[in-house]
Image (spheres, rainbow, N blue to C red):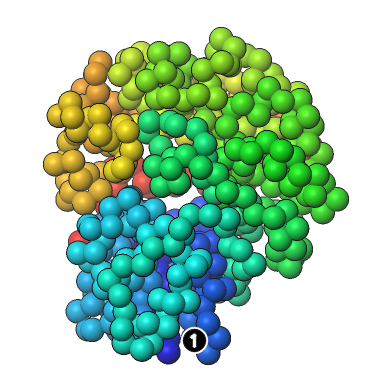
Amino acid sequence: MHVTLVKPTLGRTEHDDRFVDEARMEPLSLGLLAGLTPNGVDLSLFDDRIDAFDPDAPTDLVAITVETFTARRAYEIAAAYRERGVPVVMGGMHATLLPEEAAEHADAVVTGDAETVWPGVVRDAHEKRLAPRYHGACGVPQPGARPRRDLYRGKGYLPVALVQFGRGCPHGCAFCAVGAYFAHRHHARPVAEVVAEIEASGRRDLFFVDDNLVADPDAAKELLRALAPLGVRWVSQASLDHTHDPEMLRAFADSGCLGNVVGFESLDPDSLREARKGPNLHASPAYADEVAALRAHHLQTWAAFILGFDHDTVASLEATCDWAIEQRFAFAAFNVLMPYPGTALYARLAEEDRLLYDGRWWLHPDYRFNHAAFRPARMTADELTEVGWRCRRRWSSPGSILRRALDPATHLHSLERFAVYCAYNPLFRRASFKKQDMRLGTR
């Protein structure tokens, strides 16, 4: 039996039939499925972000991981396989949040965590008795299992190993699909298993894919203490509240942390309350103390902002970009607020009749990447789209990159930090420009 694991791309750009992602990382979830696949089953990984699509390649089962932004392309790929009689199983966050939609395009849908059910899915497919629905309860990630990293060879991924410590987040942010997926719970792996996986990978540079590495502070500190003697360099995602914990910050620095993705989201307290962004509601004015704490430990922050809350204006969003450049963060994301299915935000905007593209923007042929998918309160949808694009252009301009680089506390603190800054800023600039206005799907 042969199983093909599929990672869809976002869609097509103005100049290319398919978006090829220069900043692509290993698809950890598919590597994990490969590690859980029973012996005797042949496997191949089709990464649509780089591999040429050949629907006629021999295979007996296709497994597609579906995210909301890749759903349209995932359904295109599924149709090509199903047209010639190859069964398709879909899983991932989008398939869990909208299983009935996914079921229209697949022979089987896996909801929740796949670890406990995947071997059974493969067995059922082999015996020609694939069930229409499988559900894996959310719990401790990959118990006793490791991803098969040999499938990543030759794919041109960034030289960073993806590792997972925990899943989920206890916070109740209204816009967050992660909270909806995990019902605001967090589950962490045993630290010994994580350390053994890192050592087996042979890699020094790591990205922890956790939704919030510090969701359980005590568990996070145990992990950081175990990382300290390994000599690794790593980044992850962490909520802002970790900056109020001096012990946590010292542990970050001692364990080889270069910095984290931190959701600042907004400078406006009213917007933070609207977003139910609990960790940020007790921050100092303009995040002065929190940013100072990060800089004191030489952490290169990837600042994440969300544009389009009901209290936002074009002027306030441009001021947010000014502030981010002044802080000289290493990287930043200026994301238009997206109504993801299953979230409290989506439900509210639907009730207020403010959703655009018939509510299912991820499938609508007219939707374009980084465009507003709802009617904002204090600007038009087109104005929100445009100010987001202006923020990304300004942030990634050569002048901004040079100005932000000259920061002794972070990027100039060590040669390796400066090298990371110089290597990834141009890469993310190119990716940002390529993705803007991109069509989802390729047909």
Tell me how many marks there are.
1
> Which of 131/397 is in front?
131
Quadrant in which the N terminus appears: bottom left
Residue 163 in the figure: left or right of residue 123: right
In which quadrant of the rendered view does residue 53 lie? Answer: bottom left
User: Furthest-top residue in view?
Assistant: 285
Q: Nearer the viewer, residue 328 or 261?
A: 261
Query: Which quarter of the figure has residue 129?
Result: bottom left
**Residue lying at 41% horizontally and 47% vertically, measured from the top left:** 181
Q: Quadrant of residue 338?
A: top left
Q: Nearer the viewer, residue 138 or 226?
A: 138
In this view, 318 is above or below 86: above
Please indicate, yes or no, whether residue 367 appears anywhere in the rendered image.
no
Query: In the drawing, does residue 327 fall left or right of residue 366?
Result: right
Residue at the spot x=66%, y=15% of the render? 289
Indicate left or right for 23 with 338 as reference.
Answer: right
Give the residue displayed 54% in from the left and 74% down from the top: 36
Residue 7 visible (yes or no): yes
**68 horizontally vs 181: left or right:** left
Q: Compared with residue 90, is residue 301 higher up or lower down, i.e. above or below?
A: above
Quadrant housing the C terminus? bottom left
Q: Amino acid at mark 1?
A: Val
Q: Is residue 78 above or below residue 99?
A: below
Residue designated by label 1: 41
